[in-house]
Image (cartoon, rainbow, N blue to C red):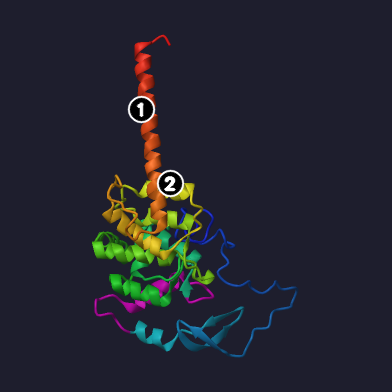
Amino acid sequence: MGQCVTKCKNPTSSLGSKSGEKDAGKSHGKKGGGMGGAHKEEVAKSSVDVIFNGTKVSEVTVEGSTAPAVSAEVQREKSTQDGGGVSLAQIHDLFSCYKDEYEDAILEEGMERFCNDLCVDPAEFRVLVLAWKFQAATMCKFTRREFVDGCKAIQADSIPGICSRFSMLLEESRGEESFKDLYRFTFQFGLDAEQGQRSLQRSIAIALWRLVFTLDTPPLLEHWLDFLSENPCGVRGISRDTWNMFLNFTQSIGQDLSNYSEDEAWPSLFDSFVEWEAERRRREQSDAAASETDCEAASVWPGT
């Protein structure tokens, strides 16, 4: 599988794993050192309070590792059935198939297996839409609450059930208000919460813009992304305001940019893009005219 969009140096590769800027696969601390001869590590017997899925519970000791006890809330929920017909017990069991050994969450390794079982590429639009419906706070991670609530929201409690919902979810994402919500979710989803980021890295933003517009690509998108890749303004990050306003830009500004006005409250980066795009088009027209002149001269003087 690939690497997570927001966590790697090659952000176009994947939503389902997070190698790259951080060491790959280190979703938890190192395990204890090796054993020599008959020597074994002592297993801690004391219990301490820990925070588990938002609730304080006691740890239970398991030889070789320490795992959080399943909360009474989860136990109660598993014994009930959602009113829509999905089995909460099956949802919890499905979650357990992919959850991390040390944390009550599906992390990058489990996410890759989850996507593999769904027969989807972690980098594709369907995974982004699923994360949106699960209201996932972080790339490459589903908490138990996000997974359970998400499955309830899409009325699915199995891998075939989730797969059967994809066409409906894709259609839903094309609605005007739904897409606006998905679009704004994507910005937050792309931030590195652990680092306290408030703006997207330029390369991450480029990858996410291309991803979120998979089904309906605005005519100006590729030129906008070329502008950001060339980066004549020295942009390092994309703010939430710039991200949100770009959707308005694609919906209100024509492809020829003739109705764009610097007097309106657009981010200054858009002013720079419009100037850059106008200059690019002038060069393109000039090159086309020069090429046409050369062709005409060649037809008049074929021997030259």
Please tell me whether residue 46 is drawn above or below residue 230 in the rendered image.
below
Q: Along the line of sight, which residue is nearer the eye, 258 or 248?
A: 258
User: Most extreme residue toward the front, as rendered?
Assistant: 263
* Quadrant in which the C terminus is drawn: top left
Is the residue under label 1 in contact with that under label 2 (CB below 8 Å)? Answer: no
Q: Residue at x 47, y 68 (%)?
A: 198
Q: Residue at x 27, y 55 (%)?
A: 252
Q: Along the line of sight, which residue is nearer the eye, 197 or 114?
A: 197
- How many C-alpha atoms fall within 10 Å of the one at disc 2: few (<14), some, or many (≥20)? few
Q: Cα distance, mark 2 to mark 1?
A: 23 Å
Q: Is residue 51 visible?
A: yes
Residue 93 is covered by the magenta coloring = yes
Mark 1 is on which residue type? Answer: Ala
Residue 293, quarter of picture: top left
Mark 2 is on which residue type? Answer: Asp
2 vs 1, front mark:
1
Q: Along the line of sight, which residue is nearer the eye, 199 or 170?
A: 199
**Residue 267 screen position, x and y as percent:** 39, 59
In-image side of 224 versus 59 (left or right):
left
- Report the disc number at residue 289: 1
**Residue 41 screen position, x and y as percent:** 69, 80
Q: Earlier in the sequence, mark 2 or mark 1?
A: 2
- Report the disc number at residue 220: none
Q: Which residues are magenta?
A: 80-104
Q: Quick one: SS at disc 2?
A: helix
Please tell me whether residue 123 is drawn above or below residue 59 in the rendered image.
above
Q: Along the line of sight, which residue is nearer the eye, 34 or 12?
A: 12
User: Most extreme residue toward the top, as rendered?
Assistant: 303
Kindly identify which residue carries mark 2. Answer: 226
Q: Is residue 121 visible?
A: no
User: Most extreme residue toward the right, as rendered?
Assistant: 37
**Residue 118 screen position, x and y as percent:** 37, 60
